[in-house]
Image: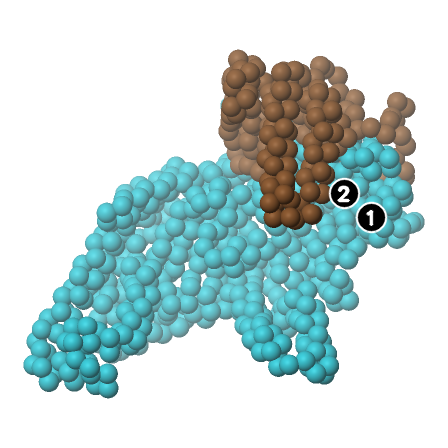
Amino acid sequence: MNEEPVARARPHLAAPRTDLTDGEWHRLHPATPLLRGGIFMVAIIGFIIANLRERLIDLFIGEENYGGDPIDTIYERGATGWALLIIAGVLLVILVVFYLSWRTHTFRVTGEIVEVRSGLIFRSNRKARLDRVQGVNLTRPLIPRLFGAARLEITVAGQDGNVQLAYLGSKHADDLRRDILHLASGLRQAKQPAAPDAPVDQASAVDGLPAAHSALGDFASARFQEFRAPELDPDAAWPDSVVRILPRRLIGSVVLSGFTVFLLLAGIGLIISVVAGSSGWVLVAVLPGLIGSVGYYFSRITKTLRFSIAGTPDGVRVGYGLLSTSSQTLPPGRIHAIEVSQPILWRRFGWWQISINTAGQASGRSSTAVTGTTLLPVGTLADVEKVLQLALPGFDTDTHRALIENGMLGGRKRDAGVADFYSNAPARAVWLRPFSWWRTGWAVSGSVALIRRGVLSRDLILVPLARMQGVRISQGAIRRRLRLASAALHTVAGPVTASLSVIDVDEALVLFEWMSTGAVRSALADTSHHWSRTTPPTQKATQ
Amino acid sequence: MPDRELNPSAGQQAEPAPESSDRLELAETGEWKRVSPKYVVVEIVGTIVNAVVVCGAAALLWLLLDQTWAMWVGIVVLAVSIINLVFEPRRVRSIGYLLRADDLLFRRGILFQRFVAVPYGRMQLIDITRGPVARWLGLADLKFVTAAASASVSIPGLAEADAESLRDRLVELAESRRAGL
């Protein structure tokens, strides 16, 4: 079904990569309509035919012929020609619709914006400003991946403001991502065309489809190479900035989750109820859930397998996925809050995870949202330090490292001899936080605020003050009695909430002043919206 | 940024400031701007309407369907509403805002106190809304919306002209201090 568009698109696909960012309108990968909805449609039609064929015959012929095959019936009645004609007509209509939707779905990238327009009847047009880009995601779901296609998504702030380029040729998507990030970074220099072998490779891959058997083999082997290739092109990342996770540790971390505890409790409850002689309905009710949980583990593990995070000149790149892969680029200064946390089950192994808040929410299923906010699914102390250095460049002096380590492991009670850099909650906070009061504290260093809290799950929260939206302190009747208050740093929505539940009253006032002045000052000094420009745009500060 | 790298009280207890009290009170110089005293009427009407609706529903449940628990719910709601009404004037008086050099300060609450500071540069938009009662009194609510839903500051009960001039002032301040998201 997709031969025809492939043939037409060849000149475009073989073009050098700078062509995509020249401000002209371009088309997407020719198999796009098929990949976006066609496969589902075919499946649905197949399902309907399989289920309703007797009914259909009954409807059209009015004969009680439930045992027969529709093709037999058509043949017997001499209606073969008509049937073929109808099928051909339907196919033609589908092809025309696909072709038109592919024709009208175009995008362009200029120095300032990315714009997509699509739709036959309901035209839609969507623009994103490049200096407001919150992240660039390159996703390869399984089936498009087999076709050598990828989806490029440019996230901007807001709930539903993303610009999706679905689908592009895999290689083109890579190049376009690089170009978009270059443009967004404020580098206006002309880029060189792609390496000479790239277009040739692409052309051969495209030629492969309609041509002879050997060419088809080339296509297959090209796809296979792509499938096995690492998510990260080695020239884009500094090799020493890459963090990888052993599959063993990843599986262990998923198994040692709160879900497992819940599952174990449910299992124990089940056994008890069976032993106690209850009827079989409990088993019937619970067992499907238990079996379904296997699927949960499987999807969690395959989604985060092959996880890698690396620093590139254009931001942190996070890649993950075994079957459907995804790689997300977060330009500098797009991280609004970071949480390093350790669930109690992980403590024995010294594992930590890192989640972040970003202003742009990757669209689509909830699973992408979960993975999109995870910067490190599981890692050791050394991994955490590496990732934090990527996420907060310039936050890597010895003092900062000590702060981070203190925040993760330290507390007021422990290491009494060593200086604890955090300003801790007073001992009377034990009335409100009987277990975690000695770990509850805060600190400010440079332009980053740190909050340490939690015992069952040890948390360290880092908020770059340049991204903080506001600060709140509050006090209720009980806290007033204890001369305590609570504080919160407001950031954009996400899994991280930067709040401090107990803090001395006078400390709270100090925190309020420091955070509010720090937020203003670090925002003025911040130039990360055009991160590659060396000089800050002065009119912003002085206007 | 504060010029000291790390916290002053690192490693030691925070010694209370000389004139410290249990209450949370900013040592802020400057006059807090208060909202219009007429705003009390809006709050009182809101509370009464709320109480009447809930108590009415409870009474119906109690009298028609013979649900005794509904009576207790109604009594509790009534009592809470009456206490609220008594404290309403003080609570409205506790609402205040202050335009500092670089950020907007907001406070409210007597029993449960709350202070919020939002830098002007973080403004995404400003919303002015008028409820029916507020419109009758010539009042308006102003909402300063940031990228964080929780950091939005909502100043209720401003005179309409004040709300509009405050909006223009805030927009102007935000324009000069714009920070990219």
Quadrant containing the N terminus of chain A in the rendered view: bottom left
Tell me which residue sits at (73%, 21%) in the image.
Answer: B90
User: In the displayed structure, does residue A129 sit left or right of residue B92?
Assistant: left
Please provide percent x and percent y for residue A116.
33, 45
Q: Chain of mark 1?
A: A
Q: Which residue is mark 1?
A: A433
Q: Which residue is mark 2?
A: A501
Letter of the cyan chain: A
Please provide percent x and percent y for residue A264.
69, 73
Tell me which residue sits at (65%, 66%) in the image.
Answer: A259
Counting other residues with Cα less than 10 Å from the Cα at mark 2, is it few (<14), some (14-19), or many (20 or more)? many
User: In the displayed structure, does residue A268 sit left or right of residue B181?
Assistant: right
User: In the displayed structure, does residue A39 sit left or right of residue A226?
Assistant: left
Please provide percent x and percent y for residue B23.
82, 28
Tell which circle, 2 or 1, labels the residue nearer the N-terminal end.
Answer: 1
Q: Are marks 2 and 1 in contact (CB under 8 Å)?
A: yes
Q: How many marks?
A: 2
SS class, disc 2: strand
Q: Is residue B78 above or below residue A411?
A: above
Estimate the spatial distance between the alpha carbons at disc 2 and disc 1, rounded to whole Å. Answer: 9 Å
Q: Is residue A420 visible?
A: no
Q: Is residue A321 above or below residue B2?
A: below
Tell me which residue sits at (68%, 77%) in the image.
Answer: A270
In terms of depth relative to the viewer, which is nearer, A538 or B22?
B22
Whether callout 2 and callout 1 share a subunit is answered: yes
**Mark 1 is on which residue type?**
Arg
Letter of the brown chain: B
